[in-house]
Image (cartoon, grey):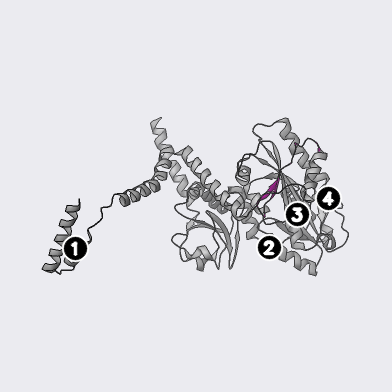
Amino acid sequence: MAGARLFVFPAFLLGLAVVSAYVEELDDKFNENRKSEPWLVEFYAPWCEYCKTFEPIWYDVGAELKSLGSPVNVGKLDTTVHSSILSEFNIRGYPAIILVKGEKSFEYRGPRTKDGIIEFTNRVAGPVVRPLTSAQLFQHVLSRHDLFFLYIGGRSPLKGQFYKVAAEFIIYNYFFSASEEVLPQAVSLQEVPSIAVFKDGTYYLYNEERDGNLSDWVGRERFRCYFQMDSFTLYQMGETTKLVALAIVDEMNPTTESIRYKALMEKVATEYRDHYNTNFQFGYMQGNDYINGFIMGELAMPSLIVMNMTIDGYYLPEQKVETMEELLQFLNSVLNGRSKLLGGNGFGRRMKRLYYRVMSAVKTSFASAPFVTCFLLSLPVGLVVIIIWGVCTAVPVDEGKADEGALLATGIRPAASQRKRTAQMSNESKKED
């Protein structure tokens, strides 16, 4: 058994070495290499604990892309050594994942998983708009992607707009083009050229008169009508004008009420899409950890909440929601201003959020390492105590001796009269005592 353990450990190290060989540690030469080849780069800092946890996933990404024959090189760059990179790529957190194609860069903003990163890389590294030249190819795309945008028709000003918007949103979604003949008969077009989004088992056509700017329409439609959200998705919601209506549930311990809340949200998202799609994005979220940090309190599960991610505000129903009618009343009260807006991003609220995050970090640290946390917290307190003790116990220096000491320090011996005067002052102070 001991021999088996000794064999497994070197084999593990060998496998790790092979996988890490597909990830290159980058240096100053990166600025030259990136002009000729696409690079997927992790920008990290040695002190970042999450970067260390993420490292095996990053090595798996490098190995997977290599096995798929991807032309994208995978690397990592220490921003503490190459600090000029921070401003060039606008690095605001670690680890930052950016795909670099020549002078263009695309930041990955999804969950830090191997599949998510590889999907992002394959999408962004290829053409901004991919042509679908046959009905079979269209069916393949339809079966593989939950959501994608499609331009139908030949050359036109609308096609130029589509390509421009595709370059803006390629980090999130796929964009394709096709002729009308490629589409199945079930897809009915009002006119050609047209733009459609395929999602949720159906499709929706873009209408400039009704939907306004194409970029705004793509921004509203780039999510499915109803889906499970996480912190990364909610962060992206801050870039849209939509409110986020969520059912907060504990799927590990489902209850009748949580199932009902999810069903209500899904029903209003699909059956009332025409009425609420412009203003709301619907979904559900597992657990209340992120929401508690957002509202700086404790939200019971299951619950319903509407969030305004642009201003860090939120709405809660004034009474328990039991039926579809009550849910619709709550959503309408948010839209017409009758429901009270909580939270926000005012100065006082930001200070409270900062305090909440600091206290949450201290609690988390104390739960995992209580002795180390207590030691670190005691350091500034101890420093203040030492300073106060030093000030309170300082001995005042006699003025005459201070003058004499100053002269001696400069190498000048005080005159006899001055020494005599100093002695007299000393004797007088003793008599007074």
- Earlier residue among tags 1 and 3: 3
Q: Are marks 1 and 3 in contact (CB under 8 Å)?
A: no
- For the residues marked 1 and 4, what is the alpha-carbon distance in whole angstroms? 88 Å
Element type at mark 3: helix
Which residue lies at the image location 51% right of the left edge and 50% below the top edge?
59
View extreme (front): residue: 432
Q: Residues within 10 Å of mark 2 (few under 14, many from 20)?
A: some
Give the residue type that dot 2 points to. Answer: Glu
Vertically, is 166 above or below 234? below
Label at residue 405 = 1
Instruction: Check disc 3: other Cα within 10 Å, few if <14, some if 14-19, many if 20+.
Output: many
Q: Which mark is residue 221?
A: 3
Q: Which residue is mark 4?
A: 275
> Which amino acid lies under the numbered mark 3 shown in the image of this protein?
Glu
- Quarter of the image where the N terminus is located: top left
> From mark 3 to mark 2, how far is it between C-alphas?
14 Å
Q: Which residues are magenta?
A: 306-323
Note whether residue 378 is visible: yes
Task: Determine which of the numbered discs, if any, sits on residue 425 in the image.
Answer: none
Whether residue 280 appears in magenta in the rendering, the answer is: no
